[in-house]
Amino acid sequence: MNRKIPHICSFAAGLSILVLSQMPACAYPDFQTFITKSSGRPVNCAFCHAHSDGPDGAAPGQIGRLTPAALERLGRARAAFEPGVDVDSPILNAFGNHIIKSLGKRKFLEIRTAPEQLAVLLPQDSDLDADGIPDVQEYRDGTHPLNRNDGRPLLLLKHNFQKNLASILLTMAATAAGLFGLRHLLLGFAQAMQLEEATEEKEEI
Amino acid sequence: MNLREIVQKIEAYLAERFPTGKLNYASLVEHKLVPVHKLSWAYYLGGLALFFFLIQLGTGLLLLFYYQPTVSDAHASIEYITEHVPGGALVRNLHAWGSSAMIAAVIVHLLTAFAMKAFARPRELTWLTGVCLLGLTFALGFTGYLLPWHQIAVNATKIGLQSIEQIGQYLPGRMAAWPSVIKETIQGEPSVGQATLSRFFALHVIVLPLCMAALLGLHLFSVQVHGMSQGVDEPPRRYEKFFPIFLIKDLSLWGIAFLALFIAALCIPFESFYAYPLFEPFNPKGSTPDGIKPEWYFYFLYYPLELLPFWVVLLVSTAAVVVLLLAPWIFKNTSRRTLRLLAAVASLYLFVMTVFGEKIYQLFKH
């Protein structure tokens, strides 16, 4: 009896792979088009998906490469119609999962025709990459919400300056101290040179 | 003229350009003076370029400990440096910001040296080595751009190498094949791949820095023995001592430049100026992402290439290089006032193309 269980499991997994691979892989280009148009920055599927070419295909992060366990997680994420479900879809990245968890699949599908709504409906204070720019702002700017090196330069400057203020002040103090010391060292050498010259002149006289 | 006279002439020429008699403590330190006038600030630019070069050497050496020059590992090693090596992101950013700062400093140094007629006799060879150093700096920028092996790096390099090949159609006879040969030699294989990366790595890390060090040595030697050029048409009324006054000011500027570079590298990732898909690993089977273009310091050449026929850009840039190389002889009798005007026009062109190049391109293309 127990021996049959693995067979049943592998049959179910195989069946689900077959069913899921026949289903259309729903990437939503409406959002991508909106971001590119509003921000002027080109973006790709990696904004929300695990793979930059989207969910179709057999590369890591795409449906063709999913293990039975990953397919199960995908199924759960696809069934998360209401907000608040802790989804972990293997074809989405952390931002994609964050969208589904915050809005639910139903609401997400509803706003496809008005993608600008996503920036209003997502939690305003969430900052997944901790770069100081909220995810909704990154969505509007076309910068990646999971890449702390990607963001509007001035906003990154403001955030990183505050974050590294102690290091900056210490470096300023060290540079100033170094220059102060170097200046006095050089002035000292120059005075010694003049003194030497004066002594030589006196000796000549 | 017999051989002896020719040799004597060459000797005299070199003796005037490299007066080794001045290689003593008194000439180089004790009695060396720097003119003080309205363009004195330009005397600091060469030192600033040297400072950025030293930063590049230091940060480049540190990056070498982790960087892997293979198409399979290059991008991953860069990500490893940025995300996992302590201080790696700072060092990498210092290298990226430093390269731009160095190129900017070298360009402004060249323009001000031109405006101040710093190429006038006996400083012709100082000027020539300076122009070659500018070329080497651009070459370092071009070869270094490919090393991270991301989308923009590989695709921009492809465009750059294609431009070399295009030159062939304007050359006569057998010479028409030369650019293709040069391109294939640099590329190392039919398309940009492992051989290209290996060659660019060797050029960027060994060949070009060694050439740079040799030329820089000659340039600095020449600058030291001749001292600062007069810089203005009317004789300067005031001078200051090179040691210690000018040197202290120079080192203070290095300190300020270091702080500016440090803050920029710590707070603004260089990549933030571009769209993130451009920094994904290069995928030879994938489509080319939008927004591929060279680094900002090639815009003055890139946007004209996009807008004008290739032969026009080729002709103008060849003429510009020839004029730069022969400046000491072409502008021998030109006043500094005229040179300042020419330098201002060149600066304006570079500024407009660098800052507004894309807007101009869109205006004419759409």
Image (cartoon, coloured by chain):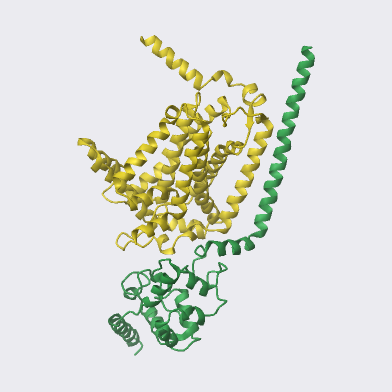
Q: Which one is nearer the viewer's eye here, B180 or B80? A: B180
- Seen in the picture, residue A8 relative to B166 is either above or below; the reply is below
Which chain appears green?
Answer: A
- Seen in the picture, residue B234 relative to A153 is either above or below; the reply is above
The image shows residue B120 at horizontal and vertical percentages of 50, 27
Q: Which residue is drawn at 54% across and 40% down?
A: B49
Check the picture and name the quadrant holding the N terminus of chain B: top left
Count of numbered labels shown in the rendering: 0
Q: Residue at x 68, y 53 (%)?
A: A170
The image shows residue B276 at horizontal and vertical percentages of 44, 63
Q: Residue at x 78, y 19 (%)?
A: A199
The image shows residue B349 at horizontal and vertical percentages of 45, 46
Whether residue B170 is visible here, answered yes or no, is yes
Which chain appears yellow?
Answer: B
On the picture, is A94 further left or further right than A205? left
The image shows residue B129 at horizontal and vertical percentages of 46, 31
Check the picture and name the quadrant holding the C terminus of chain B: bottom left
Whether residue A86 is visible here, answered yes or no, is no
- Seen in the picture, residue A109 relative to A185 is either above or below; the reply is below
Q: Which one is nearer the viewer's eye here, A99 or B222? A: B222
